[in-house]
Amino acid sequence: MLDPLSSGTVEKSAQPHPDASQMSVNCAVITVSDTRTPSTDRSGELVQQLLLAAGHQIGMYRIVPDEPRRILAELEAATTAEPTISAIVFNGGTGISPRDTTHEAIASVLTKTLPGFGEIFRLLSYQEIGSRAIASRAIAGTYRHLLVFSLPGSRGAVQLGIEKLILPELVHLITQST
């Protein structure tokens, strides 16, 4: 990339503002599904594995039916019943079928949104799965003291979102939102 003020080039950094230190973030994982159980929830299990492998903690794990009231009740529980939780990762319910209501539920209460999260997630998804990526309604933002991420429920989408977007920025976003 050319520096407009000189004739030299500028090195592009993977992390423009590196975090001073790593910290462990206490996270909640909520799978939104009408059919999954703890023994069949492979995506929720993957979210937990990836967060734990990166040195973070899981302070809450739930499976909730794709019903806006239940989704919001779990979001509220993460803020009140588990006050040490700083981030919540939802997976599932982000498509366009009539039962997919996670996006509407979460979008209705976010204090601030991170539009780039969904945009970049869909770009990365497009690079992997092609035009089907347009059906994803991944979203992220803040609710009270929490960072909130909502990913599609497939294992591929979970892995992509956690590894490429959430883990590289989680600590930075936590320090910015508190």
Image (cartoon, rainbow, N blue to C red):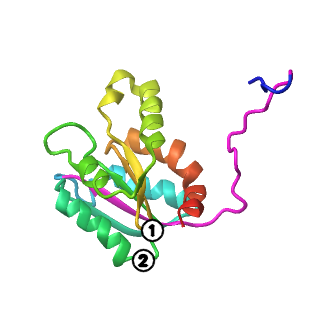
Q: Main secondary structure of the magenta part?
A: loop
The residue located at (28%, 47%) in the rendering is 103
What segment is highlighted magenta in the picture?
Answer: 7-33
CA–CA distance in space, label 2 to label 1: 9 Å
Instruction: Return the x and y of residue 113 as percentages of the image width and height.
Output: 42, 50
Q: Quadrant of the C terminus?
A: bottom right
Nearer-the-camera pick, 104 or 97: 104
**13 in the magenta segment:** yes
Q: Which residue is mark 2?
A: 83
The vertical placement of 125 against 84, above or below, is above
Q: Residue 111: which quarter of the image?
A: bottom left
Q: Furthest residue to the front?
A: 5
Nearer-the-camera pick, 17 or 161: 17
Indicate the amino acid at tag 2. Answer: Pro
Which mark sits nearer the N-terminus, 2 or 1? 2
Q: Which residue is mark 1?
A: 145
> In the structure shown, which secondary structural element does the residue marked by tag 1 occupy?
loop
